[in-house]
Image: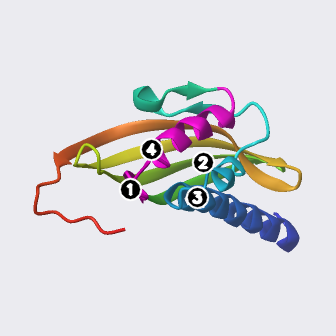
């Protein structure tokens, strides 16, 4: 039977991993590439974001594409507006400094250039590792479950 200290350590690790993933989602929505990058291991992250964004063997490649897409501006306004709602975490500690996790993501994106709105449901399949005393994402594979894209009609006003 695990001791109280072991049980507390387990609960703290699970909470730290949840907070890591929430920081990632918040960094994406806040258009903060540095905070987004800080969520991943320093080197060698295994990342697959599907056919739309591709595969990366390090988080720098993902952050580069994210920055090119999410930080586009026209007339001092962002062109791409994102909303990440991560939920239903299922996290398993696999060792003292490793874990796996699965999440569901409700993703919404407005593209002001294309005048479209996209709503997508995705699943995340992650691995986590402790690096320099902090939990980081070591592997992140995304599977798109479904997506709807619709035009923004002329009567739709987007305020930012």
Residue under the image location 76 percent in, 42 percent down: 41
How far across and how far down the image is residue 10, in percent? Answer: 76, 63
Disc 1 to disc 4, C-alpha distance: 35 Å
Residue that appears at 37% across and 38% down:
144
What is the distance, in whole Å, between disc 2 and disc 4 at their CAs?
10 Å
Mark 4 and mark 3 residues within 8 Å of each other at the beta carbon? no
Residue 93 coordinates in the image, percent (x, y): 72, 51
- Specify the label residue 101 is tagged with: 2
Answer with left or right where residue 70 lies relative to residue 3.
left
Q: Is residue 146 above or below residue 119?
A: above
Query: Depth-wise, is mark 1 or mark 4 nearer the camera?
Result: 1
Q: Which residue is mark 3?
A: 27
Q: Is residue 73 left or right of residue 120?
A: right
Residue for point 20% across, 65% down: 157
Q: Earlier in the sequence, mark 3 or mark 2?
A: 3
Q: Point out the tag, 1 or 3, that comes first from the N-terminus.
A: 3
């Amino acid at each position: 039977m695990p001791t109280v200290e072991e049980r507390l350590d387990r609960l703290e690790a699970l909470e730290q991993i949840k907070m890591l993933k929430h920081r990632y989602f918040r960094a994406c929505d806040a258009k903060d590439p540095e905070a987004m990058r800080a969520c991943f291991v320093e080197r060698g992250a295994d990342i697959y974001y599907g056919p739309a964004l591709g595969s990366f063997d390090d988080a720098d490649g993902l952050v580069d594409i994210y920055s090119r897409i999410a930080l586009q501006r026209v007339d001092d306004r962002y062109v791409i507006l994102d909303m990440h709602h991560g939920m239903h975490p299922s996290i398993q500690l696999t060792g003292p400094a490793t874990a796996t996790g699965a999440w569901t993501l409700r993703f919404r994106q407005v593209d002001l250039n294309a005048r479209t709105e996209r709503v997508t449901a995705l699943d995340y399949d992650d691995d986590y590792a402790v690096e320099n005393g902090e939990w980081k994402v070591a592997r992140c594979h995304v599977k798109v479950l479904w997506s709807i894209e619709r035009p923004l009609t002329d009567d739709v006003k987007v305020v930012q």
